[in-house]
Image: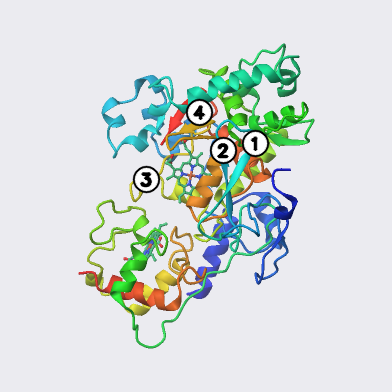
Amino acid sequence: MKLPIAVAVVMIAGAAGAGPLPADVLVDEGAKNKTIWPYPQQDSGKLIYKDHRRDLSKWPTLSYGDDRATPRPQRARLTGTLNGDPARGKAVAMNKGRGNCWACHALPGDPQAGTAGPSLLAFKARNYTDARVYEQVFDARVVNPVSAMPPFGTFGLLSEQELRDVVAFLQSIE
Amino acid sequence: MRLALLISLAAVTAGAGTALAQQRNAQPYREHVPYIDWKPDVTGDIQHTGTYQYWKDRKALNPDWVASKEHQWQLNWKFMDPSYDDTLHGGHIARDRGAALYKKLDAGGAFAACLGARNGDLKGLRANHYPQYSTALGRVVGLEEMIEHCAARQNVTLENGSYDNSAISVYVTEFSNGMPINIDVSKGPLKDAFERGRERFHLRNGATHFACATCHVTLVGRSLRGQVLTTPYGDAAHWPTYRTKDELQSLHVRFAECNRNAGAQPLRPGSPVYSDIEVFLTALSNGYPVDVPSARD
């Protein structure tokens, strides 16, 4: 037994059909953000567990005992005018802890641009409608079912306003 | 349009193509990255990234590429394995500690026997026998899980993934240096583990909805802001490894790090899923020689 018993069985509040998380999922209800990770302390036969900066227990894991479903692809409809703020959108897109779009996409002024997705430089010239860009960022699976891009809206990674801000930012890239 | 999408999505899941995928129909909705044609041999990379030709011989790596940020990924980071660049690093210190710990545990010869060594001979144990189905434990285990089990029989705590456990693993593994990995995943419990591991490798999970295969297959050769993704072929022959951020790391602890970096919930080292992925990845190193103590950035 590697974890204190109290850690092994944890309830996830609110998740649909949620039972206790399986014992092999590294979650400690008492830890800062629940999610913990193993660190091999030098010259010791025991692992120490460190706090992760974020609670990752809310999404389906690799564990065989995890019976939670993944949210299905969702086509979002943009309602009303975009009403997004490009500066705020930039702060979300070019930030490791937020949208992290630059991990995969080239964005203005990034010297180590990611190449996993298409460049978003000169995005404005593509003349996409706001609705189309919103749909893509909300859930890329409606455009490409096997997309590598995270479903930011469907998975609740960005709020509706953050999505609007990010779209406004992209649409402003000359 | 909506309908067409749903159909193509169903095709993707069916594309996972195993009995496992079908069994899952009754289970909650999950998605997989489509399988590629995996071969349980390191030469399978020829059809995957085609980089194998550049790293198949660790002693003949292109020195210009070793120094080139653009080309390093095509060498699969093999220039950090000992035969190519045997600089002293934390992995060597760990090996020495592992040797001392091993000798203490094996004073009566029981530890070696428990690990499966004949007459205390560790040669080839790692290359030819791990991961394996353990009759004592009734499941497929990697070398580190077995080290934990065999130490526990002497009332010594050596948790799978801990420094001391990995130190012993490096020591034991070194006796296989130069010997190609050789595990048989064509039958029995290892075949089942290989197939389960392959399925988990393609299973999307976590906040970002990535699978291992998103990065190590779909995006292989691409850069995530300076980190270029490499082939999973040939990745299991240099573990445990010394990470230059100063951490002696077992393969399972590496999986936990990949999970967490990718925004996905890590699992416990030694968990059934990590053990199965270890079998899958070890089979992708079949034919590639063991080499420790290694280092990785």
From the image, tell me which residue sits under label 3: B227
Q: Is residue B24 left or right of residue A96?
A: right
> Secondary structure beneath disc 2?
strand
Three-letter amino acid code at the position of disc 3: Gln
Residue at image position (70%, 69%) is A17
The chain containing the residue under callout 3 comes to: B
From the image, tell me which residue sits under label 2: A40
Q: Position of residue A29 (x, y in %)?
A: 65, 59
Q: CA distance from mark 4 to mark 2?
A: 18 Å
From the image, tell me which residue sits under label 1: B160
Q: Position of residue A133 (x, y in %)?
A: 36, 73
Three-letter amino acid code at the position of disc 2: Pro
Q: Position of residue B290 (x, y in %)?
A: 52, 23
In the orientation shown, which residue stands out farthest toward the left?
A174
Is B52 drawn above or below residue B270 in the view shown?
A: above
